[in-house]
Amino acid sequence: MFRPVVRLVEPYNAGVFPEDVLRRYGIPKERIVNVASNELPYPPPEAVVAAINKAVATANRYPKSDYRELKENISEYVGVPPENIAVGCGASELIDVVCKIFLDAFDRVIIPVPSYSMYVLFAMLRDASVELLETEEQSFEMRTEHLIELGENVKLLFLASPNNPTGFQMRRSEILSVAETLSSSIIVVDEAYVEFGNPKWSVAAEAAGLDNLVVLRSFSKFFGLAGLRVGYAIASKEVAATLEKIRLPFCISGVAVAAATAALENLEYYQEARGKIIKGRAFLETRLKKLGFKVFPSAANFLFSRLPEGVGARTLTEALLRSGIIVRDVSGVLGLSREYLRVTVGTAEENQRICECIKAFLEEDKGGRA
Ligand SMILES: Cc1ncc(COP(=O)(O)O)c(C=O)c1O
């Protein structure tokens, strides 16, 4: 009944949710620290909540399907014309639409791993020929020379920068040299986390002027609207118009449009939140290193680390869950062969609690193993 490729696909693993922890361990939601999905730990500011509440009253209506105003507001935020912007139900929908507009069966698609799992899924669903490019496990840095060596017959290359789960951000000059060298390939740069990294390394402005460069962005991370599903792409006018043509007509709800618009009008709130996240990231990095973790430098709102020798990610993750802390064991993901953990930066109080619980676990674990 189903296409063979559909049978090959594993269901998306969204990890453990607070509801699951409540059910399993009876821990009330307000005691749970959810640092597993790279969300912002802060709720939307009052102005955004007010805009959401107002928009709910017209939920009987479809949103305006060209999303012109939203694109104009995004245009002001990123500094490219609205005609170079396409929108989607999160960056996730745009990954799918990018695959739909560019990929035919057997087209060669390069996906560096470890990275965000949706690239493989949507490329596979187009029956593309997917090649996983392993990054060097000592540093997880994406090296330009490896990408340039790929040759001429690459149809599409996905690059997440900053990358999930490693936190590695590629330099702007390096991405541009890849785009220039692989001039007949489409280079998709996923910048879902870019606001937490070096803004000068974004290639959004260049994407508007280059036919083979597409940048994806999200309102789920920096703007903390993961629950409302808003994403956008920046590309040449022709590519942006084609993405717009193929995406679902009403992919973003009116409520989500109102929230994203209000978020863009309240940038100071998010800039302040980013300041706290970057401080929290430095705190977590120092503390985890002290506990014997190998922490990789991160340009995102999470930290990726290798566990101290002899400590299992699964055991640690389970122990933290029992204390109400949800982190992500990423050991099993494509491209990783050892024990790794991904921890989203939480509030200062949450970060403190995470470190205390990990410390307590390691002391107990050492005691048990001694
Ligand atoms: C690299 C990357 N791109 C895209 C997404 C999805 O973003 P959205 O919520 O906008 O679909 C994620 C989510 O975790 C991600 O890590």
Image (cartoon, rainbow, N blue to C red):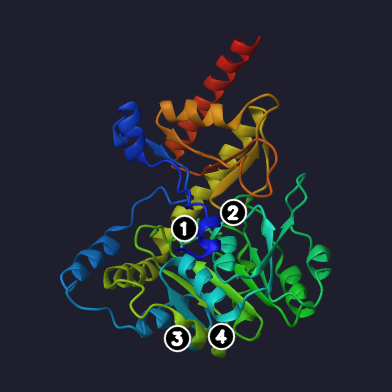
Up/down of 251 relative to 111, above or below: below
Which residue carries the number 2 mark? 164
Quadrant showing the C terminus: top right
For the residues marked 3 and 1, what is the alpha-carbon distance in whole angstroms?
26 Å
Which numbered disc, 2 or 1, marks the residue that appears first in the sequence? 2
Circle 1 packing at 10 Å, graded few (<14), some (14-19), many (20+), is many
For the residues marked 4 and 2, what is the alpha-carbon distance in whole angstroms?
25 Å
User: Are discs 3 and 2 less than 8 Å apart at CB?
Assistant: no
Which numbered disc, 3 or 1, marks the residue that appears first in the sequence? 1
Closer to the observer: label 2 or label 1? Answer: 2
Residue 31 in view here: no
In terms of secondary structure, where does tag 4 sit?
helix
Please give the label number shown on residue 274. Answer: none
Which numbered disc, 4 or 3, marks the residue that appears first in the sequence? 4
User: Are discs 4 and 3 less than 8 Å apart at CB?
Assistant: no
Q: Is mark 1 within 8 Å of ligand 1?
A: yes
For the residues marked 4 and 3, what is the alpha-carbon distance in whole angstroms?
10 Å
Closer to the observer: label 4 or label 1? Answer: 4
Question: Residue at horizontal 42%, vertical 65%?
Answer: 267
For the residues marked 4 and 1, what is the alpha-carbon distance in whole angstroms?
25 Å
Q: Is residue 45 left or right of residue 94?
A: left
In terms of secondary structure, where does tag 3 sit?
helix
Please give the label number shown on residue 239. Answer: 4
Residue 350 in view here: yes
Image coordinates of residue 107 in percent, x first then y, are 67, 75
